[in-house]
Image (cartoon, helix red, strand yellow):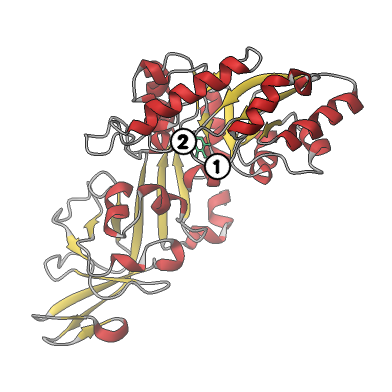
Amino acid sequence: MTESETSPLAYATARLEIDLGAIVANWRDLARRHDGEVAAVVKANAYGLGAERVAPALLEGGCRHFFTAHLSEALALRPLLPGVMLAALNGAPAGSEEICLENDLWPVLVSLDDIARWQATARRVGRKLPVILHVDTGMNRLGLDLPELSVLAAEPARLAGLDLRYVMTHLVAAEVADSPSNGAQQARFAEACAALPDAPRCLANSSGIFLGPDFASDLARPGAALFGINPTPGRTSPMRLPMRLLAQILQVRTIGIGEGVGYNSVWRAGRASRIATLGIGYADGWRRRFAGQKVMAWAGPGRGFDERPIPLVGRVSMDLTTCDVTDHPELRPGHWLELMGPRQTPDALGAMAGTIGYEILTGLGPRIQRVYAP
Ligand SMILES: *Cc1c(COP(=O)(O)O)cnc(C)c1O
């Protein structure tokens, strides 16, 4: 038996097919566009696609800098990412110094307190320690604020013992190309860096890479674009979409005119209808908000099935979703329908659920089997 046959997920009724080669191709594409090195942000399980497979594929593809959000994520990935930069953007909480050092995780310092704590650690272990300094230039979320920066500029000895590998900041609205905040943050960042000891800079996220040469730095930090989220909203996506989401038909039934489907019968048949029930629901991240939107499914592409879209009908429930397959008499239980892919992207689904593609991808749950193509 293969490993997949012994896993309970071999019986999953929802499947995410992930093309690792397309993710690596996206990374290479960003690396070509950016004048400086390019990291990979693999936080939140690589935006739902599975960090344990995605991160090693990117390593193999040439990526040498990785970021997670939580320290727990970085710790879990370290054995899979030997010998390359790995840092947790949310920072290294007090008490984590030892485990960070053991795992060669560079702490992202966000305050004078953080700096003092790591300086003390450097003194204790008797060597210079690599750190990343996060300065806040407008997000007002994480990082040293302006008063803290002036203290640091006036008292550079606070950084003694620390090896400043990068100074970083994060853009508030990089995906809005003409937002005045982009230029304002870029200028504030340049000012902050000028006041600090000379160190490499780390600026752009996915969309930032597309803002032009002023936003290039020694290291960019894209996440979303690697996974097919459009970094240039309003324009055609320059990225490949590296995944497809499929769900399996559990049952097909015929109902009469006027009969309701699902909770509260919010949809009623206007004709005699065939209803297919799929094994995916909002507990899998397939949003309840999709009900009543123009969300579609498609019969298994390339299998000679009718390629016309199949409308979702009725409420999305926790574990099940229903759709109207009246015009698809070939469909039977056991067949798979495509729910997300090039014809209905994470961005498009996000818009229909009143959110963004990021939340759609990172919300995909553990009952969905991830299947990888190399
Ligand atoms: C999530 C995150 C990124 C990556 O952003 P994308 O828009 O997904 O490219 C970069 N930097 C920080 C600080 C982040 O939190």
Quarter of the image with the C terminus is top left
Q: Which residue is mark 1?
A: 43
Left or right of 98, for residue 72: left
- Which residue occupies 43% across, 13% down? 35
x then y, percent, for residue 25: 39, 26
State whether label 1 is within 8 Å of ligand 1. yes
The quarter of the displayed image where residue 249 is located: bottom left
Marks 2/1: CA–CA distance: 8 Å
Q: Secondary structure at mark 1?
A: helix
Left or right of 337, for residue 361: right
Q: Secondary structure at mark 2?
A: loop
x then y, percent, for residue 53: 54, 39
- Which residue occupies 22% across, 57% down? 299
Left or right of 7, for residue 173: left
Give the amino acid at mark 1.
Lys
The quarter of the displayed image where residue 75 is located: top right
**Mark sitting earlier along the chain (2/1):** 1
- Which residue occupies 69% across, 24% down? 152
Numbered mark located on residue 348 in the image: none
Dot 1 alpha-carbon crowd within 10 angstroms: few under 14, some 14 to 19, many 20 or more: many
x then y, percent, for residue 14: 41, 60
State whether label 2 is within 8 Å of ligand 1. yes
x then y, percent, for residue 143: 60, 36
Numbered mark located on residue 223 in the image: 2
Dot 2 alpha-carbon crowd within 10 angstroms: few under 14, some 14 to 19, many 20 or more: many
The quarter of the displayed image where residue 65 is located: top right
Compared with 276, 197 (above or below) is above
Compared with 229, 282 (above or below) is below
Judging depth in this view, the residue of 5 and 93 nearest the camera is: 93
